[in-house]
Amino acid sequence: MKALLVLNLQNDFSAFGNMPIPGTDELVPLANRLQLYFDVAIAVQICYPASHKSFAANHLFRQPGKTMMINGKEQLLAAIHCVHDSFGANFINGLAIGTIHKTFSVGTDAAANIYSAFADEALQHPSGLSEILKDKAIKSVYIMGVNVGDMLLNTASTAIDLGFETFLIKDACSGLDISPDFFENLNLKGLQLIESKTIENNWGNGQKVGYF
């Protein structure tokens, strides 16, 4: 059983969002096509509270892109984005949510940074993703989407740690500006890279078989 994880395809990362990441809009039709080739398709979205510690606007005289010390740790500050129940946090228009089996939210704790689709950096708020994957007897996960704060790669690393065969669909990612050494370490850990055309050309007719 295979699962597709679609991460952070949200308005604020689109071309007209508060934190646009080049290439994000082009992932929407690809995500819609790829969903059809998997037993389970899961979408993950960032839903910050407005008071989140990473927002520069929540700190006097601070600007996005700068860092500051918070509770003894260096914090990179960002523009306000993906606030819970805002337009920016919504999935990009055109993403076929009707064929997504399950959606999960991350980033809901104002005091914790996002880390992966499985939990925040402090591992205090698990998303429930691991339980769903295990409940559906998923053996392999395929990851695509927007790489915010290394979330795609951290998700891949966590998935490997949890025992899933893990693939990154490299041409189905935006914001993936990672050093070769980082990739090499993940490859040594067990991450496998794949292209979307391999899935579309070799996986049959794209019939979805798993439902919640």
Image (cartoon, rainbow, N blue to C red):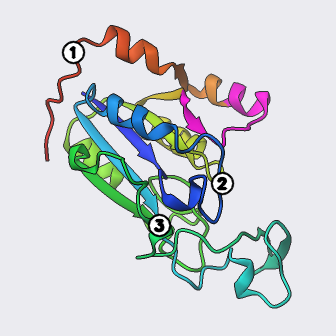
Q: For residue 105, what is the image quadrant?
A: bottom left
Residue at 26% over, 42% down: 134
Residue at 26% over, 52% down: 102
Disc 3 from disc 2: Cα separation: 16 Å
Q: Are marks 1 and 2 in contact (CB under 8 Å)?
A: no
Q: Which residues are magenta?
A: 171-185
Pinpoint residue 137: horizontal percent, then vertical percent.
Answer: 22, 35
Q: Which residue was labeled with disc 3?
A: 89
Position of residue 190 relative to residue 67, above or below, is: above
Quick one: SS at disc 3?
Answer: helix
Callout 1 environment at 10 Å: few (<14), some (14 to 19), or many (20+)?
A: few
Residue at 47% over, 59% down: 119
Q: Are marks 3 and 1 in contact (CB under 8 Å)?
A: no
Disc 3 from disc 1: Cα separation: 33 Å
Pinpoint residue 192: horizontal percent, then vertical percent.
Answer: 53, 21
Residue 22 on the magenta span: no
Which of discs 3 and 2 lies nearer the camera? The answer is: 3
Q: Which residue was labeled with disc 2?
A: 149
Observer able to see residue 163: no
Q: Which amino acid is tagged 3?
A: Ala
Q: For residue 110, what is the image quadrant?
A: bottom right
Q: Which amino acid is tagged 1?
A: Asn
Callout 2 environment at 10 Å: few (<14), some (14 to 19), or many (20+)?
A: some
Q: Earlier in the sequence, mark 3 or mark 2?
A: 3
Q: Nearer the viewer, residue 113 or 103?
A: 103
Q: Nearer the viewer, residue 105 or 205?
A: 205
> Farthest top residue?
202
Observer able to see residue 10: yes
Q: For residue 44, what is the image quadrant?
A: bottom left
Tag of residue 205: 1
